[in-house]
Image (cartoon, helix red, strand yellow):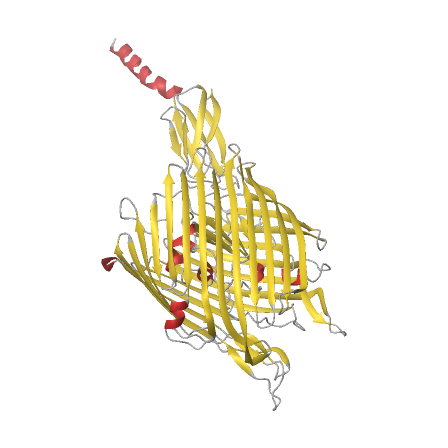
Amino acid sequence: MKFVHLFILLSSIYQPILSQNMITGMIKDEFGSPMFGVNIYLKDTYDGASSDLNGKFAFKTEESGQQTIVASFIGYKTYEALLEISQNKIDLTIVLQEEINKIDGVTISAGAFEASDKKKSVVLKTFDIVTTAGATADITGVMNTLPGTQTVGEEGRLFVRGGAGHEAKTFINGLLVAEPYGLTPNNIPSRFRFSPFLFKGAFFSTGGYSAEYGQALSSVLQLNTYDIPARSQTDISIMTVGADISQTMKKNNTSLYGQIQYTDLTPTFVLIPQEYEWERAPNSLNTTLHFKHKFDGGGNIQAYSNYDQSTMILDQPLPGNINEYGRNDIVIKNTYSNVAFNNSLGSRISIQGGMSYSGNVNRIEGDNFKLDSKLNTIHTKLVFDQDVSEHIQLKYGGELIFDQYEELIFDLENKPVQQLKYSNDLISPFAEANVYFSNKLVARIGARYESNEFINAHNLTPRASLAYKLDQNSQFSMAYGKFSQLPVKEYLKWSTQLKSELATHYILNYQFVKEGRIFRSEIYYKNYDQLTTSELDSENRTQFSNSGYGDAKGFELFWRDSKTINYVDYWISYSYLDTKRKYDIYPYQVMPYYASSHNLSIVYKHFIPGIKSQIGGTFSFASGRPYTDPNTGKFNSMMTKNYNDLSVNYSYLLKPNLIFHAAVSNVFGFNNVFGYQFNAEPNENGVYESIPIQPQAKRFLFIGFFITISKDKNANQLNNL
C-alpha cells in the first residue's frame, strides 16, 4: 500500500515535467547580427528568458495551444507573433526592426548651425544673441562669431565662405525678408533691422541647405518668432543710443506684442569723436507688432509687422576725389510684414506657409543730385510635411516671389532726368525626402525648380545630404547641392539679357556633442558659374553679361564648452578660406575685396551668481583683405593689415526686474583698416593719393537699463529668451 502511495506522489510530480515545452531560438537585428539582452517571453505569462551574447535564448513553459510570443529591446520595435505550442521543442529565429527616432536620432549637420533651446545639438542659444560681447545685441554680429563668416567691418552684413553680402538671405518664420539691413553711406556699416528679443531661435546654414530655400548662393539665416509668452509684461529700455517701450499681452492661447523704439546716435558721437563730419547723426523710429494664436490641436497662426524710418546726413570724401567732401542726406523707410501659419491635416501630414511683404523706400540727396528708389517684394509660400512611413518623410511645396523696383534720378532743379525700373516674378516648386535607413543613417534627397520670365531663367537645382551617427555623441555628415540666384537689382535695372547666377556646394562635416560640449569640423568646396560682370565697350558703354566664375574652398573648426568650468561658457571658431572670383568689374579671377584667408573668434562668458552678474569678452581676428592700389597697376594685389578687436561687456541684475548692461568694443583701440580709397587721377608727382577706410570711431560705448513691469515683479526681458 505504501508503494502505491509513493507511485501516485511521484507521478504527480513527474507529470508537469513531462508536459513542459522547450522554446529556443536566435535573436538578430535586420542586418543579421545577433542581439544580446533581448527580453523574450510568452504574453500574459511569467515564462521567458533573455538572449545571450550570441543572440540565443531558451526557456520552458507549461503553456500549450496558441500563444503570443513577445521580444522587446530598447530602440527596436516590439516583436509579437502567434505561436502554436503543440510539441515538446520549438526553435525560432526572430528579427527585430530598429525603431526610428526622428527626434534623438541622427540629423543633417553639414553646413547647419542651430540656435535655439529645443535641440540638444544646438551651437548657439537664443540667449547668446543678447549676451555676446562685441555683437551689441545684433543678430548678424553674433553669427559673425561662427565659422564660415568673414569680418567686413565697413558693411556690417553676413559674408559667408567667399560669397558676397547679397548671397546670404534672411527669412522670418520661413518667409523672405527682402532688405534685412538699412541703407547707409559708403563704408558705414549697416545694422540688422530686427530686435533679437522677438526670436526664440535661429537656423544659420553656411551651405548645402534644404531645397525649401532658394535665391541664395551662399547662406540662409532663418529666424523664428517666439511662442506664446508665459505672462503679460511691460518692458522699458533706456540706453545711450535711445529708448524703447514694449507691451506683451497674453490671454490663454493668444498673445499680442507691441514695441516703439527711438534710436539716436548723437550722444554717442558727442562722447566719442568720429572720423567723418556728421551733420545729423543716424536716428530712427521703429515700431513692431507681433500677434500669435495657438490652436487647441497644436497649430498656430501669427502676424508680424515692423516699420522703421531712419535719417542721417554725412559729409564724406567724394569717390575719386578724397580731398573734396560731398553731402549724403539719406532718408530710409522700411516696412516688413508677414502672416504665417502651421497646422496638422491628420496624423501623418501637416501644412505651413504664409505671405510676407517687404517695402523699402530710400532717398539719397547729394550736392548735385537726388535719387529715389522703391522696392516692393511679395513672397508667398506653402509647405507640406508628410510621414509616408516610419522611414520616409516628405517635404514638398512651392513659393512665389514678386519684385517691383523703381529708381528716379533728379537734377538740381528737382526734375527727373533718368528712370530705371523692372518687375519680375519667380515661381519655385520644390520637393525633398528624408530617408531614415536607421537611427544611425539618414539621407535627404531633393530638388528645386525656379522659373523667371523677366530674364527667361529656368533652373533645376538638385540637393542631397547624408549623415551617419558613429555613436551616441558623434556623427559624420556630407552635403551636395546646386543653387541659383537672380542678379541683384543694380544689374536687373539695366539689363534683361542676363541669366541666373549659379553655385555648387560640396561639404563634409564631423560633429561631437556631449554634456555641454560641442565640437565641429568641416571642409567644403564651392564652385561659382554665370556670375554677373560689367565692363565698358569701345564706345564707353557699360555691357553686362554672365561671364563671371569663381570658387571657394576651406576648412572650419568650432569648439564650445559650458561644462568644464563652473559658470563659464566659451567658444572658439576658426575659418580658413581660399577663394577667387571674376565678377562685377573684376578684370580677371582674383580674391574679392571682402575675403580674408583666416578668421578667428574667441567668445568668453562668466556668470557670477554671488553678485548676480555676467562678464563677457570677444576677441576677433581676421587676416588682411585685398585692395587695388592704382600705383601698382595690378588689380586687388595689395593686402590690408590684420584686423584685431577685443570687446567686453558687463551685465548686472540690480533687481529681479531691472538689468544694467554696459559694453565697449575694441577696448585696446586697434587701428583697423578695411581698405583704401584712391583719387581717380594722379597728383603732380604721378602718385594716386589715398585715405584709409576705417571704423567711424576706434571704440563704441553702450550703456543701458532694462526695466520690466509685471504682476509678480520678478520677470525681466530675458524671460522670453
- Seen from the viewer's position, the closer of residues 267 and 413 is 413
* Residue 196 horizontal/vertical position (percent): 42, 55
Taking 349 as reference, is 602 above or below it?
Answer: below
Count how many numbered circles sit on residues in the image.
Answer: 0
Residue at the top extreme, as displayed: 1
Query: Is 469 positioned to the left or the right of 503 in the image?
Result: left
The residue positioned 56% from the left and 53% from the top of the image is 359
Taking 264 as reference, is 231 above or below it?
Answer: above
Q: Hey, which quadrant is residue 134 in on the image?
A: bottom left
- Seen from the viewer's position, the closer of residues 366 and 347 is 366
Taking 67 as reference, is 429 above or below it?
Answer: below
* Residue 214 horizontal/vertical position (percent): 60, 52
Residue at the front extreme, as displayed: 413
The residue positioned 63% from the left and 53% from the top of the image is 403
The residue positioned 34% from the left and 59% from the top of the image is 238
Can residue 220 be seen in the rendering of this structure? Answer: yes
Can residue 125 be seen in the rendering of this structure? Answer: no
Query: Is 508 positioned to the left or the right of 229 in the image?
Result: right
- Seen from the viewer's position, the closer of residues 369 and 156 is 369
Query: Is 526 positioned to the left or the right of 193 in the image?
Result: right
Q: Hey, which quadrant is residue 500 in on the image?
A: bottom right
- Seen from the viewer's position, the closer of residues 489 and 10 is 489
Residue at the bottom extreme, as displayed: 685
Query: Is 703 positioned to the left or the right of 611 in the image?
Result: right
Residue at the right extreme, as displayed: 538
* Residue 573 horizontal/vertical position (percent): 44, 64
Quadrant (top left, top right, bottom left, bottom right) of the N terminus = top left
The residue positioned 55% from the left and 64% from the top of the image is 161
* Residue 236 horizontal/vertical position (percent): 34, 54
